[in-house]
Amino acid sequence: MKEALKAKNKQASGNNRMFKYLLTDGRTQVIALEVQPLYSIQLERSLPGSKILLIGPIEVRRGIWLLK
């Protein structure tokens, strides 16, 4: 499993990647798009349920948070 995640992260580390995240606080769900690579988020460490800290301002278009 770890090797599959490493291969995915290596493959996704290019300039053309775009990730879609479903963020929730337990009640509210928000869709977020990574429009510029966020190299601090590593796939092998960011498993479902991981906590992240977002520092604003965050641009929102059509209800989707755009992460830069």
Image (spheres, rainbow, N blue to C red):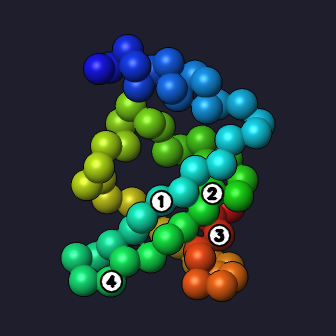
Circles 3, 1 touching at the beta carbon (< 8 Å): no
Q: Is residue 10 left or right of residue 29?
A: right
Q: Which residue is mark 3?
A: 66
Residue 16, x across and y down, in percent: 76, 39
Residue drawn at x 37%, y 77% is: 29
Mark 4 in CB contact with mark 2 (< 8 angstroms): no
Residue occupied by mark 1 = 21
N-terminal of the pair, mark 2 or mark 3, is: 2
Question: Marks 4 and 1: in contact by CB < 8 Å?
Answer: no
Residue bearing the label numbered 4? 28
Q: Residues within 10 Å of mark 4 (few under 14, many from 20)?
A: few
Check disc 1 and give the amino acid type: Tyr
Q: In the depicted view, which residue is nearer to us: 58 or 60?
A: 60
Dividing the picture into quarters, in which one does residue 3 lie?
top left
Tag 2: residue type? Answer: Glu
Q: Secondary structure at mark 1?
A: strand
Are the residues at dot 2 and dot 1 in contact (C-beta closer than 8 Å)? yes
| Identity of the residue furthest to the right in this view | 15
> Label 3 to label 4, Cα distance in Å?
17 Å
**SS at mark 3?**
strand
